[in-house]
Amino acid sequence: MKTFQKIVLCFVVFLIATAFTKSTENGYKVGDTIEDFSLKNVDGKMVSLSDYKKAKGFIIIFTCNMCPYSVANEDRINALDAKYKSKGFPVIAINPNDPKASKGDGFEDMIVRAKEKSFSFPYLFDEGQKVYPKFGASKTPHVFIVNKKGMKVEYIGAIDNSSKNPDAVTEKYVENAVDALLAGKKIEKTETRAIGCTIKVL
């Protein structure tokens, strides 16, 4: 009887644990169609992908204030927006962290950071952590390139092959992928491994 009770107790604990865990296993894969979203930008305005009438696609990057990998990539993210926004592929940055689990990642902190680094792109707050699980994002930074035609995912992974040191970059995954899309060519690498901090949840 005691063994049965232990089994039941373990099963209940498992159900409770999984109920409150945000799984990313069923996130978008390359070729999937994404849903639009509406998230608050650091300027206080709500932003959706549908707002970008002239865009050809989007460089969606899950990033944050506190992860050293994200901080090491901030200038590169600014550079991506500067290079590709005018060509139809703007950067859309999203902070997926729960601020209660990651001090310094609250909305007010995001406003300060965006101003300090002169972000030229929207920096959106995933309040309630409703968007990042749909994408299947697991790290900061984690990139998803989306083709506006069909809202299809074309690339998932890292910005380049050097997670921290920009001087060590020898392969620019995101630039190569966007350049291929703009040229109407096939992307050679559609997936790479995102290296960074785990997304923080309570």
Image (tube, grey):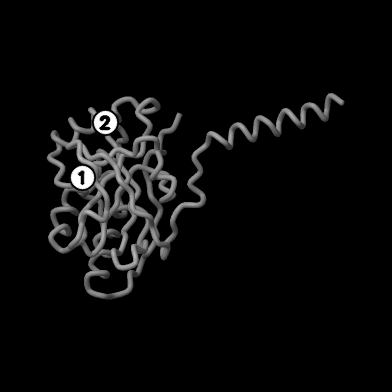
Alpha-carbon distance for marks 1 and 2?
A: 13 Å
What mark, if any, has residue 107 been given in the picture? 2
Identity, as a three-letter code, of the amino acid under mark 1? Pro
**Mark 1 nearby-residue class (10 Å; few <14, some 14–19, many ≥20):** many
Give amino acid for label 2.
Answer: Phe
Residue 90, by quadrant, is bottom left
Give me the disc on residue 141.
Answer: none
Residue depicted at 38% across the width and 46% down the height: 195
Q: Nearer the viewer, residue 111 or 139?
A: 111
- Relative image position of residue 33 (x, y in whole percent): 40, 62
Task: Using residue 46 as the reference point, say whether residue 156 is left or right of it.
Answer: right
The tally of labels here is 2
Q: Residue 152 at x, y = what percent?
A: 36, 64
- Dot 2 crowding, Cα within 10 Å, few <14, some 14–19, many 20+: many
Q: x, y percentage for residue 32?
A: 42, 62
Choose top left, top right, bottom left or bottom right for residue 89.
bottom left
**SS at badge 2:** helix
Q: Quadrant of the N terminus?
A: top right
Question: Who's the residue at 44% across and 59% down the image?
Answer: 29
Disc number at residue 122? 1
| Left or right of residue 187: residue 78 | left
Give SS at disc 1: loop
Lower position in the chain sequence, tag 1 or tag 2: 2
